[in-house]
Amino acid sequence: MQQLTDNFHRKFEYLRLSITDECNFKCNYCLPDGYQRTHQKQFLSEAEIKNLVSAFAELGTKKVRITGGEPSLRKDFSSIISTVSNTAGIVKVATTTNGFNLKKNAQNWFDAGLSAINVSVDSLDARTFHLITGKNIFQKVMDGVDAASLAGFSQVKINSVLMKGLNDNNLELFIDWIKEQPIQLRFIELMQTGDNSDFFNKYHISGQSIKEKLLNAGWIQKVRSSHDGPAQVFTHSDYQGEIGLIMPYSKNFCENCNRLRVSSLGRLHLCLFGEEGIDLRDLLSSPDDKEKLKARIIASLGDKKISHYLALGQTGGTPHLASIGG
């Protein structure tokens, strides 16, 4: 089997695949004015997704995360999960959701082949949750988290974007919550994109201070596997849950990069904060184009940079996190 590698000897076993850029939330750090469609193109079809994932699997991809926008807004979401999970070579299929459709669909998604799920919950306080997301449905989302646990997922992960003065005071509440819950909390540093510089400057807080608190409190950092995401994960003998920190502004963050992204319109992005991406869609309609598709993907990796340049304020071509799947 071929293996995707770049000029810096990094191996890519993890594909983040967006199936829509539409979202029904208005999170203040991502889509404060709600979703505004900026194109007339149709999102990738299930057949195109099948051809795409098959090519990536033959290039060594083992894990696919289905993202958005909000992926569950697609009526064929369960079918897409099944298509991806039944692709030879793919051993893990994950998704990230805002939880809006989770309670009624968690079992269906698990049965379709979804093996891991991340739910965005930026506060455990209902009023703060409403303030951040624009949706007054905190309890509905939390019921969805419970439904996912009951459906059979071995560990539900909770994503929370850290924001100074908005939810950073929820930290102890979050940690207390996982004492008896086998949940992995993932605190994500707020990232600057093309349209949120003022918000970023006001609310950004470093995850390093949280890491130091965890280590001082006896939490121990786990060793990551080859197809894990970018989180530094910590465990503690007194807690059933885990804590993950995603700190894109930390030193050497890109050193272990193992993931590529494809947008809902079929563009390959070598970095969340790269430029406009490489179009793959002309090679997705037929399985007969698989070898050409694989060749284009391999060739594109020659242009992957050693790092993003977020610390220099360079956000690349990413207008907001929903545009290419976060």
Image (cartoon, rainbow, N blue to C red):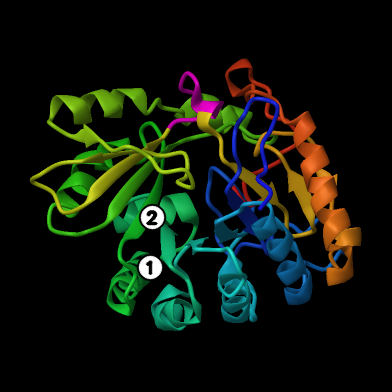
Which residue is painted at 51% across and 31% down in the image? 256
Question: Does residue 260 sit above or below 26 in this rendering?
Answer: above
Identify the main secondary structure in magenta: loop
Specify whether 277 is left or right of 190.
right
Q: Identify the amino acid type marked 1.
A: Val
Secondary structure at numbered mark 1: helix
Decide: marks 1, 2 in contact (CB < 8 A)?
Answer: yes
Any part of residue 208 in sight:
yes
Categorize mark 1 by other alpha carbons within 10 Å: few (<14), some (14-19), many (20+): many
Residue matched to label 2: 121
Q: CA distance from mark 1 to mark 2?
A: 8 Å
Sequence-wise, the earlier of marks 1 and 2 is: 2
Residue matched to label 1: 141
Which residue is painted at 32% across and 37% down in the image? 223
Specify whether 249 is left or right of 80.
left
Q: Identify the amino acid type marked 2.
A: Val
Q: Position of residue 313 (x, y in %)?
A: 64, 20
Q: Quadrant of residue 187?
A: top left
- Tag count in the figure? 2
Range shown magenta: 247-255
Q: Position of residue 152 (x, y in %)?
A: 32, 75
